Image (cartoon, coloured by chain):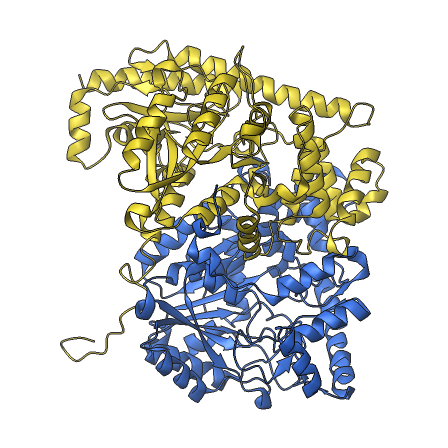
Amino acid sequence: MTSLQHVNPRVRGIRVSPQSVLQSLGVQKPFQEVIDLSSGDPHRAGMKPVSFIRQVLAACLYPELLEDESVPLDVRLRAQRLLEDCAGGSVGSYTPSSGLLHVRQSIAEFITRRDFGVPSYTKNIYISSGSHRVIVKLLASGEEEARTGVLTPMPCPHTLPTLLDEAGVTLVPYRLIEERGWAVDLEELHRAVTTARGRCQPRAIYISNPGNPTGHVQTRESIEEVIRFAAAERLLLFVDEVYQDSVIGLDREFISYKRVLFEMGKEYADTVELVSSHSLSCTCIGECGQMAGYMEIINMDPEVTHFVDTMLCTDISAPVTGQLALDLMLKPPKPGDTSYDTYTQLAYIVRALELLNDLPGMSCQPVMGGIYVYPHLYLPSEFREEAKTLEVEADVLYCQKLLKEERVLVGAGHHGGATSSHHHLR
Amino acid sequence: MTENGVMSRAKVLTIDTINPTVKKVEYAVRGPIVQRAVELERELSQGMKKPFAEVIKANIGDAHAMGQQPITFFRQVLALCSYPELLSDNTFPEDAKSRACRILQSCGGHSMGSYSASQGIDSVRKDVARYIERRDGGVPCDPDDIYLTTGASDGIVTMLKLLVSGEGATRTGVMISIPQYPLYSAALAELGAVQINYYLNEDKCWSMDIPELQRALDEAREYCNPRALCIINPGNPTGQVQSRECIEDVIRFAAKERLFLMADEVYQDNVYADGCQFHSFKKVLFEMGPEYSETVELASFHSTSKCYMGECGFRGGYMEIINMDNEVKAQLTKLVSVRLCPPVPGQALMDLVVNPPQPGEPSYDSFIKERTATLSALAEKAKLTEQVLNTVQGISCNPVQGAMYSFPRITIPEKAVKEATEQGQQPDMFYCMKMLEETGICLVPGSGFGQKDGTYHFRMTILPPTDKLKILLDKVKEFHQKFTQQYS
């Protein structure tokens, strides 16, 4: 019989994420009783889906609705147009591995519009149900000192460390600077990459902007710094921009890495290898369960992009309703249904910050974007001692108690093993 | 850096620096012949003249793409789940509405847009377990043994990933049938596992042959550690439906040789030939008594992509895990959580597949009518395909007992083999490419699936509508005769 010793050592080496432990604790009692604020899942937390998107998807799923005059005309026309691009006119068919052509075109058009004319080309767009996994797998190679390393921000999305473990890639942490609103620090990047060399082979830098879970939105100067750093240190730039649709505050706006790269002139624009990703899990849409997103791949060797396609073939294609939802997300109807939802969502974040900053033992940097608040927790030493004896991180213990006593599930900060004298909640 | 002092920034990711295992992966079903087919379609649409009016993609097992209609009830429920305001629309039957409500109750925030638990929505897993119990005449199924997956492919790759370990002579070996569905060889290449080929017996309608399994295993023991045995039943590309005796023999073999059985059963409703019946590995295992049912490790896979549903685009699937060690299961559960969760619409669809309309419910009659129509059309086309192809000299086609494909053997004249080899092409690829250019019909050469040395085949789906299929088969006949003539 197969036993633990026979299991793939790579699989055994995947760290158990505290998030999944907390989540399974939350499931032990009936679901509805727990308020889950930990998993970056807007619909679970009560946000309503965007009607237009759901109506069009319903008409695509059940095309009899195309004849139903009670369904708004723009919904019916849009559904019809989308079905034309599906093989056999059905959302039940496979699509090409990199996604439906029409949707990829819409994505390229969206990016071009968003970036004030910086061109985006359909051929560089790849739709999948997990771009991060694909890129991380592509990067993975070597053993020990030759093992690929990816510079990873601390804090980072809770799903990223397990992805790196699964692929056999070394996580090279770089600290974001809490006192500066979780900004990226160039010296810290240099320290990270220099100390990593010799332990592993750094090949990429991951960054999320707006930051997940910090909510930090980078300035143009900061983005330029990171690009120059990636170019000089020969790193693939791997940027997650999923929360680009939710930037609040009047003094900061979202600028895409693609646009900044392009505006830095040919020396960078034609050479720096950049992968930017976006998905349905963004703030205003929150269609996480549909599992679809895209990446735009810039300046990658064509021999390599051939293999991106090959890897996407393992999944055959991303779920079709998810692909269509991407089209609907990036090409919304002209009257702003979406902007109304955005407004409501962002007001909550401002309130949340005020509330948390008022609590003793908590302080939170300003949140400029995204869907998380990431407050610093000052935990009494007795509590930290208790956590130590239970062999659990103090912020994880805090979350467990919060779940048990108040039936509210939040995530622990858990900077992937870095110094545990600082605790946070997500 | 360079010689002449110009700063040339070499790429970070090149063919030499990317993951070496990724480079080993090839997908015959989506390979060069498909790319050429897409090109030809483009050329046709641009008005270029061709010896054919349309490209017929008889290469991929995509039923809807070939005009098969979805099951109305399933699509109604999914539309209701997508936009619950439709629950007040009287054109939807009551049973569809109550199914939709039930599904939405189990989704976070009552929305298909929420992530689910990584193992899949609880209530769906329970429904899958009940389906399996009903299907297998009461053999118990524990919902905890059910993992929902992103199509069956995801489940298969996950299991293979879990089981691959060791180095050199202790490296995990996995037995796969030749011919096989290329996902297996691709996954094994990527995982760096050892592929152990066992040949299906073409003369005995592609049946499994225990002496052949033994031969393959014994030879493989010299250079690897065989740990798993993969079976596809009904078969892809061969269409054979294994007899009950054969399945028992395989189980005994796996028990004796301590192999983890992986049973790909995605075509379980696609059985056409008289005297053939689908027997699930799980059921047979349990009916063989505790000596086997309590010891043999088994993973069975199913999906929403085939059978009478044909809903490939939803990426719905599940696997049932039997007799797995608890610690190993914990590792499996951890592994599936890396991907967050399978797409929720696919999970909802799977729920409907295992929980279809029941007698007395408003949608029952039309559901049965649609399902029967689809399956009987497939049965008809399976028979037609076998008949027509067997009238061609130089083509010999085993009965298409099940699944969705024919895998006929073709004779390729020596001259053609020579020309193919000179061009660096497999002879059956050469043949299929020529067929594509001259008739617009896209098939997959047998070399993509594996075949005995010196034999050639192609895989053709039976999915096009009957009248189109007739034309297709006649064109294949015509082409083969011409090709044979040309290279004689």
One can see residue B49 in this view: yes
Residue A86 against residue B482 in the figure, above or below: below
Give coordinates of residue A263: x percent, y percent: 43, 78
Residue located 78% across and 80% down the image: A351
Give coordinates of residue B206: x percent, y percent: 39, 20
Q: Quadrant of residue A171?
A: bottom left
Front residue of A162 and B312: A162
One can see residue A378 in this view: no
Q: Is residue B215 left or right of residue A212?
A: left
Which residue is at the far top?
B391
Front residue of B364 and B238: B238
Front residue of A346 and B305: B305
Q: Which corner quadrant holds the C terminus of chain B?
A: top left
Residue located 43% across and 35% down the image: B258
Residue located 50% across and 33% down the image: B264
Residue B264 against residue A41 in the figure, above or below: above
Residue A263 against residue B245 in the figure, above or below: below
Q: Quadrant of residue B135?
A: top right
Residue A234 against residue B445 in the figure, above or below: below
Apparent colour of chain A? blue
Apparent colour of chain B? yellow
Front residue of A88 and B261: B261
